[in-house]
Amino acid sequence: MARPRILLADDHPEMLKALLGVFSELGEVVGAVSDGEALVRTAQQLKPDIIFTDISMPRMNGLDATRALQVQAPGSRVVVLTSYEKLSYVTKAFKAGACGYILKTTALHAELPQALLHVLAGDRYIGLGVRRKRKLGGRASTSGPTRTERAPMCSGVVD
């Protein structure tokens, strides 16, 4: 399998630097941007296989960018990498077209390669921190996608 083409989006320079270090071992990082508008524009130009984006970014948030990417870069799969732990954000991300959701507070060196492999294989991926929240959240543990499940181009959320 060819090395996947990866695009990164986060408005924190330190986080982008850390992600570049991790992802340079896992694939070809074709770009790194710090706002949602630049993400959509760069994805259109570079056509990455997979995009990792934060939610909170200037000019356009990551959820709106994910929604736009479904039209502007439909061949790219999106994984949200964020500090937002609320399950409502997970649902919004999948409804926007994300294929994965990972919390920045987890062990990223262990989780990012797993997310990359699962999402590129066509599965949805929900990070460990989110899964723990779902288990503790009562009714929330019975809805939404599991850690890995097949999804055609990862669109929508499974009820």
Image (cartoon, helix red, strand yellow):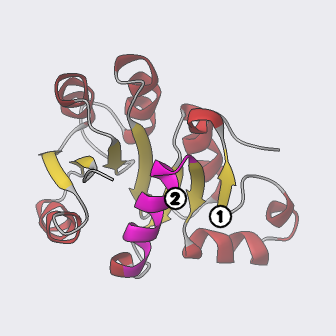
Q: Earlier in the sequence, mark 2 or mark 1?
A: 2
Cβ–Cβ under 8 Å for marks 2 and 1: yes
Quadrant showing the C terminus: top right
Residue drawn 11% across and 60% down? 13
Judged from the image, the secondary structure of the residue bearing numbered disc 1 is: loop
Residue 20 magenta: no
Q: Which residue is mark 1?
A: 147
Q: Position of residue 19 (x, y in %)?
A: 21, 65
Please state the horizontal and vertical placement of residue 71, each as a whole percent of the image.
43, 17
Percent x, y of residue 109: 33, 79
Res. 118 mark: 2
Q: Position of residue 95 (x, y in %)?
A: 62, 35
Amino acid identity at mark 2: His
**In whole angstroms, how far apart are the C-alphas of marks 2 and 1?**
9 Å
Q: Is label 2 in a helix, a strand or a loop?
A: helix
Q: Is residue 55 left or right of residue 60?
A: right
In the orientation shown, which residue stands out farthest toward the top? 71
